[in-house]
Amino acid sequence: MRLDAKPFKDITYLGRNIEDAHELLKLACMETDRRLDVLEKANCFKASEYRGKESMNPLLIAIDELAELEDKDSQQMINHLARTARKCGVHLIISLQRPSHTTYKNFTDSRSQFPARLSFKMAEKIDSEIVLGKGNFKAYHLNAQGRAMWQYNGEEKEIQSINISNHELLHMISQLKGVKGEKTVYEQQQNYWLSP
């Protein structure tokens, strides 16, 4: 994770170890609960309906390797976020290098709360089934480099992914950081939910 995420260090909050990840999950749960309270008081069902003074800017949480978060506290927080966060503008992207029943069994309660799944070529049929659902071996049968199975709200299709070079990635990140003299959205909001 440290090397893969290094280009993002200036534009995002980054957990470098399990303790950091645990702390960021705790903050994300607190922010989700705060937003839910605001929405409840405003009689709104989701963040997109809210027109009040409290900020409801979208928040993205990416977990690079779910298997690293084996502790009970992290699992409970991820389950809490999966069940409640989407309606208040907090979104999760969770990845696994290799799916296993051991990892997934800790998230069976909230697994159905993820509306989208993406799976690249799997080495074994059981791995494809773990990600895409019982009896679905399509990720095992993928035969071209970069091909993936995409599921969203019950629909499924085979897609072609892209490979972004390090040079292209750094260029995109520099665009997120903004042009000289202009404040980016990130700079304007960087202390929004983690400010003391």
Image: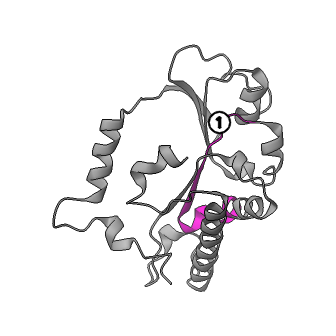
Task: Name, please, the residue furthest toward the top.
Answer: 143
Q: Is residue 91 left or right of residue 189?
A: right
Quadrant housing residue 72? bottom right
Q: Is residue 160 left or right of residue 168?
A: right
Where disc 1 sits, the SS reads: loop
x then y, percent, for residue 185: 32, 66
Report if residue 148 lies within the magenta region: no
Quadrant housing residue 85? bottom right
Residue that appears at 43% across and 85% down: 53
| Three-letter residue code for mark 1 | Gln
Q: Nearer the viewer, residue 133 or 40?
A: 133
Is 85 drawn above or below residue 70 in the view shown? below
Give neighbour class at mark 1: few <14, some 14-19, many 20+ (Cα, 10 Å).
few
Residue that appears at 74% across and 26% down: 136
The image's colouring method is: one colour
Residue topped by disc 1: 97
Stretch of the chain drawn in magenta: 81-99
Residue that appears at 78% across and 44% down: 103
x then y, percent, for residue 170: 32, 44
Q: Nearer the viewer, residue 67 or 54?
A: 67
Residue that appears at 47% across and 80% down: 195
x then y, percent, for residue 93: 57, 50
Report if residue 89 lies within the magenta region: yes
Q: Nearer the viewer, residue 129 or 163?
A: 163
x then y, percent, for residue 175: 26, 52
